[in-house]
Amino acid sequence: MKRLKIQYIAFVILLGLFFSCKKDDFTPPAVQTLSVTASSPTSFNVVGSVSKVGSEKVEDYGFVYNNTQEIDENKGVKVSLGKDVKEGEFQKQIRVDSALAYSYNNTIWVRSYLRDSRGTVFGAMLNVSLPRPSMGNIAPNMAMSGEVVKITGTFFDATANNTTVMFENIKAKLVSVGETEISAEVPAGIQRPHGQEINVSVRIGSTPAGSGYFRILANFKDFMPKSGPVGTKVIFTGDNLPDSYYGSEFKVNFGDQTRDAYYYNGGIDIPFTVKENFDLSITVAGKNKMLGAFKVTPPVITAIEPSSLFPGQTLQIKGTNFPPSEDYYGDAIGAKVRLGSATYQNVSYYPLGQFNYTVPENTAPGEYTIKLNVGPHEVSAPQKVNVLAFTATSFSPKSGSPLQQLNISGSFIAGNWYNVYVGSVVTSATAASSTSLQVPIPYGVNIGKTKISVEFPNKRVTIPGDFEVIGPSFSSFSPASAVPGTILTIKGAGFISDYNGTVVKFGSIVVYPNSISDNTIVVTVPSNVTPGAMKLTVVTGGQTVMHKDNFTLLDK
């Protein structure tokens, strides 16, 4: 038993000596961090070195980095290179974790590490400042939604998920992303009208790369309606359309016609000079965009009123598919009408569905076809219009003195002004109706028989028969003698009741009457006449009559 105990003690001693020898064979690993170099705003290259692998089994090695100096087993981002390690240099191009990239602090701290079964050793801590992204130019510097622009710069992230391009507050679709260039599609939904400048900004991660100004162009996509008469306002849809008149800012192409765009209230009027069918396109900043076809619908005349009228009167032409407005482009074409084979004449625009046409005054009587020319179409009225002849058929009475009313029968335009000739002396009046014209016999017509004629717009008509102009007569006066201031009564016929057109002469002295009737004139004997015998003369209606007897003015 004692021997066994001695043997056990010896075994324990040997075992202790064995383990003591094993502990003395342990060699720890050694690593170094040699250099770190920035590659982009999101990546850097780091070089490390394993100077001694150590005696224990290696479980992992690589680098640990952070945006602070807090780097240990539990802090920082670990980039493992595996466990197959050899002595010498090792390096890694590291892309910065998105949680650390583009932070306010762009400094990265990094150190190498190696872990074996006994623990982890670290190399020295180095740091590097990552470059900031910088935005350059936008090309082109104006475009419409859906077009692609290129943004140049430096140190852009080469991945799309870390890159954001904003047009105002709208995020753009990225077509391609590189370290020096981004291609982005101009987004729809930018709430600015054509021609205005907007802000374009680039952000790499959370770091602004810069901004610039860009001019947004109208993107016309469609229009309505697709058909209608000339003068129709077509309303456009699209992005960033203009909100007011732009003139030559962009061009509208109506088939083979190109016009500056007179753009207002959301649309453009179809000009009167287009063809019946044409393609409508718009040119913006030198780029032409086809929008679709437009068909001009022909006008239809449904009625003409009145069906009969005189030259100089106005004809109302009513219908459908008439232009909703006059020729907005001012081509001096507009709508035109012709009567029979006469030349076309411009017509005035009236409320929707009506044109007014004045029959020329030199139009001969007869039935005529009305033709309307609007835009590319010429259409005829379904019924003819009858142009009437002016007539003057009779007059009454057959005789009279100046200022007496003369009644003329015939065909007239009620309310129109007509000249009437009594012999060679003209008077005028307004027709009271379409069949009657009343005029006064004018002053200055010679006593006796003469002709009556009416002047119409296209001719002068002489009425059959003669009219006898009756002159005034001076039959008596009383008293035969008197002193100045005495009331003198003159009797006769054909006196004109016109205080400016009738006077009495005492010799050569003119006296205006106190009262006048057709057969009686009352006058006061003047005081500025030399006493003695003299002739009395009545001047009335341009005619002069003298009494054969003398009047004697007595001296007071």
Image: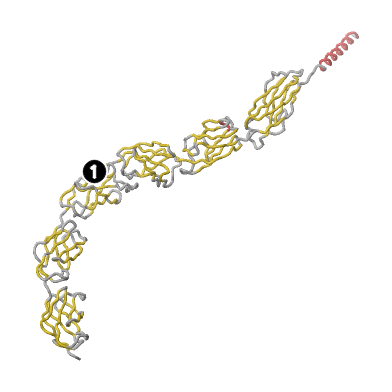
Q: Position of residue 544 (x, y in %)?
A: 14, 76
Residue at far bottom of view: 556
The residue at 65%/37% (across/down) is 104
In the picture, residue 493 is in which quadrant? bottom left
Q: Position of residue 357 (x, y in %)?
A: 24, 51
The residue at 11%/67% (across/down) is 397
Q: How many marks?
A: 1
The residue at 39%/41% (across/down) is 251
Q: Quadrant of the C terminus?
A: bottom left
Q: Position of residue 453 (x, y in %)?
A: 14, 62
- Residue for badge 1: 379
Q: Is residue 511 above or below residue 47?
A: below
Residue at far right of view: 2
Secondary structure at badge 1 equals strand
Q: Residues within 10 Å of mark 1 (few under 14, many from 20)?
A: some
Q: Quadrant of the N terminus?
A: top right
> Relative to residue 129, is residue 516 drawn left or right?
left
> Relative to residue 335, is residue 94 drawn left or right?
right
In the image, what residue type sits under mark 1?
Val
In the picture, residue 156 is in which quadrant? top right
> Relative to residue 539, is residue 278 drawn left or right?
right
Q: Is residue 183 above or below residue 405?
A: above
What coloring was used for the rendering? secondary structure
Q: Position of residue 242 (x, y in %)?
A: 44, 44
Q: Nearer the viewer, residue 267 or 338?
A: 338
